[in-house]
Amino acid sequence: MEEVVYQFLLQSVGYPRAAIVSDTSVVFSVSDAGDRPTYLIVDPKTATPLAVIYVVGAVDAAGLYAASTTADIHAKSLRPNVVQGFVVRIDFKGNTDNEKIQFYQSKDKGELYPLTATTFPDLDSLRVASLLHSNKTPAVPLGAAQSGAAVNASVAEDANELPQFDDSDYDGIRPDKKTKTKGKKRTGFWLGLLLVLLAIADAVSLRVTGEPLLQLTHVLLITGAVLAFLMG
């Protein structure tokens, strides 16, 4: 029976010879010879256990249950939830190929999941399943999350140490500037108008009396005072 399954694994499923360990005593205790798996499937590159296979004869439902339970126990003893357990039942007296050889995957508590010759997992399928189960870790480790929180807290503390500006204070500054600017424009307008009027009066005085109303010194002083006010 074992030879039939061995050839099936090699030819039909495509396992390399190095992936099929027939002498399972290298892994399992000799004292458990009666319960040792028939075959151990490993990754030939890393020798990582991937599956255990039990080959049984034409046993009844109770015999299948016992084989499945044993397969599950040994699979978990190697790598819990990573190594898979399989049971192959052979009955040469079966009328059809499906009756002669039957494939099952063992689940928790001896539960059996039926397979076929085409759905029996190959080596790559076992590798992928092993990686999926082995990589079940949080997307963001707790330590990294805590470090990130610490960094954010540090940034917040640094931000609190920076000068704080109140928007209301800032908004209150702008109207004062506008008011001062408008006030200067209005004052400049009236001073300019005053200078124009003084210039007209000076011209009239010069035409009527022959003497200017303002002396050159007065004009310079007035002009300087206006410019100083506007630039202040």
Image (cartoon, helix red, strand yellow):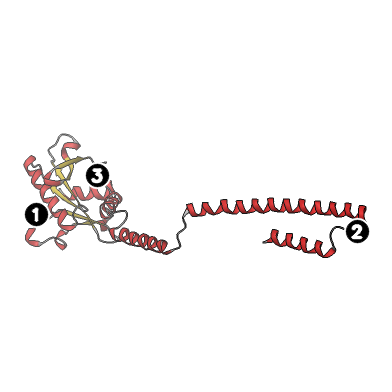
**Spatial separation of the CA atoms under disc 1 and disc 3:** 23 Å
The residue identified by callout 1 is: 35
Secondary structure under the numbered disc 2 in the rendered image:
loop
**To which quarter of the image does residue 212 belong?**
bottom right
Proximity of marks 1 and 2: CB atoms separated by less than 8 Å: no
The residue identified by callout 3 is: 120
Query: Mark 1 packing: few (<14 Cα in 10 Å), some, or many (20+)?
Result: some
The answer to whether residue 137 is left or right of residue 213 is: left
Q: Is residue 60 visible?
A: no
Amino acid marked by disc 1 = Asp
**Spatial separation of the CA atoms under disc 2 and disc 3:** 125 Å
x and y, in percent, of residue 52 in the image: 18, 53
x and y, in percent, of residue 17 in the image: 26, 56
- Residue under the image location 26 percent in, 55 percent down: 134
The residue identified by callout 2 is: 211
Amino acid marked by disc 2 = Glu
Q: Which of marks 1 and 3 is nearer the N terminus?
A: 1
Secondary structure under the numbered disc 1 in the rendered image:
loop
**Spatial separation of the CA atoms under disc 1 and disc 2:** 137 Å
Q: Which of marks 1 and 2 is nearer the N terminus?
A: 1
Query: Mark 2 packing: few (<14 Cα in 10 Å), some, or many (20+)?
Result: few
- Residue under the image location 25 percent in, 52 percent down: 133
x and y, in percent, of residue 33 in the image: 8, 58
- Residue under the image location 93 percent in, 57 percent down: 210
**To which quarter of the image does residue 116 belong?**
top left
Secondary structure under the numbered disc 3 in the rendered image:
loop
